Image: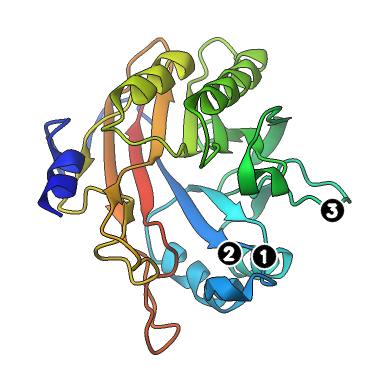
Amino acid sequence: MLTFLFSCAILFPVFCSNDTVQGKGHTELHVLTYNVKFLPAILLSQHHHPIIRAKYIPAALIADTVDVIIFEEAFDVTARRRMIRGLRKQFPYVVGPANKKAAFKYCSGVCMVSRYPMRELGEVKYKECVSYDCMARKGGLLSEVTLPDGRKIQIAGTHIQAPGDDSIKIHQLYQLKALMNEHKTAGVPQLACGDFNTCRTDKPLYDTLIHILGGVDGPICGPQQCSSDHTSNDMEHYDQQQNLVDYLLYCHDQPPVLTERRIIKYQHQWSKKHKDLSDHYGVKLKLVF
């Protein structure tokens, strides 16, 4: 267990501050990526009850300081609609889910909500998949958010292949980057966010991820260092793994003024045995640019 703890913490030194950055022309934005595990409700054996949890997730998110949210694994239609309906007053702008079509396969499970005007720029369906991931049209979604000061930012959300050979993940990353490049606009930063199913400790794959997307990662502030934590999350109890697999990467030629990443435990006692609202914790980026 200690090995997993250190593997999440030692790769990057953590320098975090509660200071507010002051400066003319600076824009502050809070972006969250959150894998909600809304697997289809018909999978009763999973005991994950997405429709029940969807009732409580909106209040937990609204109570936090968040401007844009990228959801992954929002597959179940009823749970997804209930969650978005609960967020609608505070987050009136919705895009996705990506790759939603009338057929036997599920959508990508990736969708976004925003406090600020947001429009969809495009989506991509990944060409390669393996195992149970092939039950969904996994891919990426790209949106553009217009901030109150008129500045814009493009946000890509994705959920990369879980099992299988790393080559499949690499091909998917190239497809996501192609979508981002297609809509890249001079002077407009991009974020690449989501569940990349890639641990920081998996150096060859993690370094390849950063290289392909051309993004900048950063330290996690606070004591919780892993977004997938089977030692503390009460929806995951079958092993002792602890990993950071959910990222928000800043992709732009000009460095930001400040980035601060924190892992957030969204909780509500939704059953006698469970208070964690998903099997992943949320990862939030405070961005000043």
Q: Which amino acid does label 3 sit on?
A: Phe
Instruction: Using the image as rendered, state which of residue 214 and residue 166 is in the foreground.
Output: 166
Instruction: Using the image as rendered, state which of residue 239 and residue 125 is in the foreground.
Output: 239
Which residue has dot 3 on it? 104
Residue 34 in percent (x, y) is at 46, 52
On the rendered image, what quadrant is the N terminus found in? bottom left
Q: Can you tell which of label 2 and label 3 is closer to the viewer? A: 3
Q: Can you tell which of label 2 and label 1 is closer to the viewer? A: 1
Q: Residue at x 28, y 53 (%)?
A: 241
Residue 47 in percent (x, y) is at 53, 76
Q: Which residue is drawn at 33% across and 40% down?
A: 286
Q: Residues within 10 Å of mark 3 (few under 14, many from 20)?
A: few
Q: Do the residues labelled 2 and 1 touch (CB within 8 Å)?
A: no
Judging from the image, what secondary structure is the residue with disc 3 in?
loop
Tag shown at residue 98 = none
> Would you place residue 53 above or below residue 32 in this image?
below
Judging from the image, what secondary structure is the residue with disc 1 in?
loop
- In this image, 14 relative to 210: left or right? left
Instruction: Using the image as rendered, state which of residue 166 and residue 153 is in the foreground.
Output: 166
Q: Do the residues labelled 2 and 3 touch (CB within 8 Å)?
A: no
> Would you place residue 145 above or below residue 185 in this image?
below
Residue 211 in percent (x, y) is at 41, 14
Q: How crowded is mark 2: few (under 14 residues within 10 Å), some or many (20 or more)?
A: many
Which residue has dot 2 on it? 87
- In this image, 21 relative to 182: left or right? left
Which residue has dot 1 on it? 40
